[in-house]
Structure formats: C-alpha cells, structure tokens
Amino acid sequence: VLYALGVYINVDADNRLRQLRNSGRGYQIPRGGMFEYVSNAHFFGEIVEWTGYALVSDSIAGWAFCIWTIGNLIPRGVSSHNWYLNKFKEEYPADRKAVIPFLW
C-alpha cells in the first residue's frame, strides 16, 4: 500500500509539473496535490515509494536503495525549495516545506 501511494504521489506530481512546463508561461509555483504541502512532491512520492518497497522486500538491497534515494533526494529537494523561495519571494506559500510534509 505504501509503495502504491508513493507511485500515485510521484505520478501526480510529475503530471502537474509537466502541465506547468507545457503552459509556456515560464516558471510558476506548482499547486495542487502534495504540492500544497511540499515544494518537491515528486521527491516525496519517490521516498514513500521506495520506503514501501524496502519494507516489503526486507532485503539489504531494498534498504540500500531506499537510503540512497533519501540521501540523494533530500539535499536536491532542499536546494530546489530554496530556489523557489528566492525566485518567488512573498508569493511562495510560507508554510510549504521542502520535501517532508509538516517537517522539512
């Protein structure tokens, strides 16, 4: 279930980003879905996805991939969040976190 939820969040976020890119209106603030809570909903979805996979597989490889994914996406997410804050300033939702809803 956790894996499926992560896939759903990831695909939904990717679709929302694709729609923004295809609009041709330049950089925009992503809205809707998990973007209401985090700047990088696609990264959050991947983290949930691979955590679910690691729990189900209960293997060294599964956990290694999960930890590697988290270690890779968190710094990228923080950097991206800071870019959004600098680019959009007061327009950007003040309560939106970088990658983990309500935490970080």
Image (tube, rainbow, N blue to C red):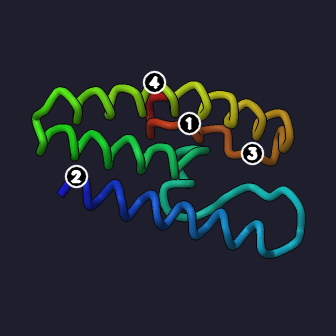
* Between marks 4 and 2 in the image, the one whose residue lies nearer the viewer: 4
Residue type, numbered disc 2: Leu
Q: Is residue 88 left or right of residue 78?
A: right
Residue type, numbered disc 4: Gly
Residue at horizontal 42 percent and vertical 33 percent from the top: 69
Q: Which badge, 1 or 4, comes first in the chain's sequence? A: 4
Q: Which badge, 2 or 1, comes first in the chain's sequence? A: 2
- Distance from disc 3 to disc 1, alpha carbons, whole Å, reads 11 Å
The answer to which of 57 and 94 lies nearer the viewer is: 57
The residue singled out by tag 2 in the image is 2
- Distance from disc 2 to disc 1, alpha carbons, whole Å, reads 21 Å
Q: Determine the secondary structure under disc 2.
A: helix
The residue singled out by tag 1 in the image is 97
The residue singled out by tag 4 in the image is 71
- Distance from disc 2 to disc 3, alpha carbons, whole Å, reads 29 Å
Q: Neighbour class for label 1 at 10 Å: few (<14), some, many (≥20)?
A: many
Q: Determine the secondary structure under disc 3.
A: loop
* Between marks 1 and 4 in the image, the one whose residue lies nearer the viewer: 4
Q: Are marks 3 and 1 in contact (CB under 8 Å)?
A: no
Q: Is residue 1 left or right of residue 97?
A: left
Q: Neighbour class for label 2 at 10 Å: few (<14), some, many (≥20)?
A: some
* Between marks 2 and 1 in the image, the one whose residue lies nearer the viewer: 2
